[in-house]
Image (cartoon, rainbow, N blue to C red):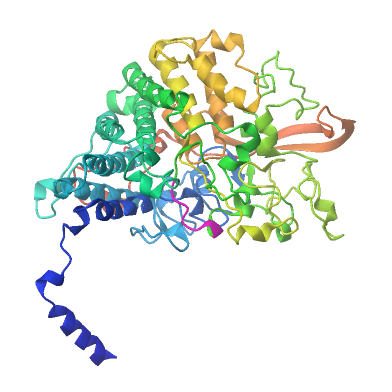
Amino acid sequence: MLAIGLDSCKKYLNEAPEATVSSTAAFTNFTNFQGFIEELYGCVPDYTTATWADPSWFMGDEIINANGNDDTGDKFDRGDYWGWQEGWVPCWLYSPDGLVHTELGGFPSSKGLWQNAWYGIRKANLGLANIDNFNGTDEEKSLIKGQLLFFRGWFHFELMSFFGGLPYINKVLDVSNKSDLQLARLSYQATADSAARDFRNAADLLPVDWDKTTAGSLTSGKNQLRINKVMALAYLGKDYLYAGSPLMNKESTGSATYNTDYCQKAAAAFKELLQYVDNKQSFHQLVPFSKYSSLFYSGGSTNTPGYPEAIFMSEVYNAGFNGCPWGPSSLFAPASIGGGQCSPNARYVENYGMANGLPIDDPASGYDPSDPWSNRDPRFYNDIVIDGDQVIYGSAPANKEQFRYAALYTGGSARSDAHCSRTGYLLRKLTPMTMNDIDGYPAWYNGNNYMHLAYMRLSDVYLMYAEAVLQGYGSATSTGAGYLTPEQALNVIRDRCGAGHVGSSYVADKDKFMGELIRERAVELSFEADIRYNDLRRWMMWDNTKYLEKTAVDFDRGTAIGKNGKAAPINMTERVIKTRIFTDRAYWLPLPTKDVYLYSSFGQNPGW
């Protein structure tokens, strides 16, 4: 075998120079260049697959894990903010082996944002440096350049969202040039301005719909994940909104307030996007509430979950392993039929208001503490399992029949610190109720039923637009953006699920409306991506006990039947399970030490 190997090496080394692939061959025609770009799509982590049963993307206040878990949220709860890059349970922000992974097959838990983003930035710059070698049509060149610019902006944006201002790398760095490796960190807003230029230029180059281009027609019907004008405008708006938010404005200017200029720029970008949606030029649209679950799991459908509302998502690397039914769902009590690892934080569940649109603490809402789960926002019943809900539908053995209905009262079969609910609630938003070994749990492994969550949905765009106009122009009824008012934009999302509009007293008061917008984002975007964690950071609310405490509700099952047709709870009390340890330095995550030590001008985040 050694002799054969050496002979093969000799034959390879003796090949004529013409047989060697040119370093510019990838950039000469559309097929090759697009193939080069495809790896950039593979650089985007599927954040739901970093762990098997521990949902590491829940870094905010949404859930509390089973006792003994050690995912990223658990680490942050005890004040270990280095934990995103350490420990036996990995985080999607950091590759466990510290390496770049862009493969499409296999189990993709190895993909880490930190490593893949820097690699993706260099790859995008390499493509842009070779754009003049491209011999395609003007349309093809626009498609190629637009994608490269988007990815360069997107990877920078994702990194700075967690770590603050960074060097903006807009060229292929030369390792032999010492000055190239001494780039200082910029302020957040300076970094955001550079990302905005890339997003804006990408939006100007890319089509709204690839299917309607000559090049895209070759893959017609399969272009939904390809970067388009809508995606670029969405991240242009998000980039500006984040730059204008209190945390980012403080990092850049010292003022922990909204920056109205950035908010107005964000509103303009979101307006441009939403008008493409209004005019039916884009395939993106809000799905009806009857199909709400299709945004989060396949349910046996051939469509990728999220379509057509998802603005941006990773590729589906391996459907059989995307997510885990006993991780985010936590539907059942004993582990033998899918006992879970996390439960909705009872304090977080309070964000779900009443069907009339009012929060539960509003005296006019009609909320009844003796019948707390009746007449709630329709999304409450879609997202949360409450005591008495049916959780098994098929024929069950006699020894499992007792688990057909969730017993979430204190001492009930669905209450456990080790499996299923620690809090009196279970999570049903992200997976179907039939994910158990009685109703068809094994289908998960066959790829017929899998979870896939987007980085951004259209509903998020409406709510970010509402926030941008509110903070950029000063009121919930402002028409300063020349489009929807903040009130109208928020009510678009309420109308989809059938919840009541924002109350008039909240519309009349800017701060009260912002409170409703915060609550609306907590409900509509609950348990998705890093949205909640980043929202509380950019609003600088993480030092508020309301968000630091994770609680359970203890109660007995009463005999009176509530308006929802189930036994109403009695003797209900809220109990604090844990309080997150937080100091101001934790608003920005610490950078990996080995990277900070590369050169002095890069610099660690304050306090770390």
Q: Quadrant of residue 562?
A: top right
Q: Which residues are magenta?
A: 314-320
Which quadrant: the C terminus? top left
Magenta region includes residue 59? no
Residue 345 visible to the viewer? no
Residue at image point 47% right, 49% down: 47
Residue at image point 67% right, 20% down: 361
**Dominant secondary structure (helix, strand or loop) of the stretch shown in magenta:** loop
The residue lying toward the viewer, choosing from 152 and 76, is 152
Residue closest to the far right: 559
Residue at image point 21% right, 49% down: 127
User: Does residue 326 lie above or below 513 as drawn?
Assistant: below
Image position, residue 101 (x, y; %): 36, 59
The residue lying toward the viewer, choosing from 470 and 235, is 235
- 68 sits left or right of 213 in the view: right
Residue 45 visible to the viewer? yes
- 303 sits left or right of 563 in the view: left
Image position, residue 136 (x, y; %): 21, 47
Which quadrant: the N terminus? bottom left
Residue at image point 56% right, 49% down: 451
Q: Quadrant of residue 443?
A: bottom right
User: Does residue 248 lie above or below 86 as drawn?
Assistant: above
User: Does residue 289 lie above or below 111 as drawn?
Assistant: above
Image position, residue 234 (x, y; %): 39, 31
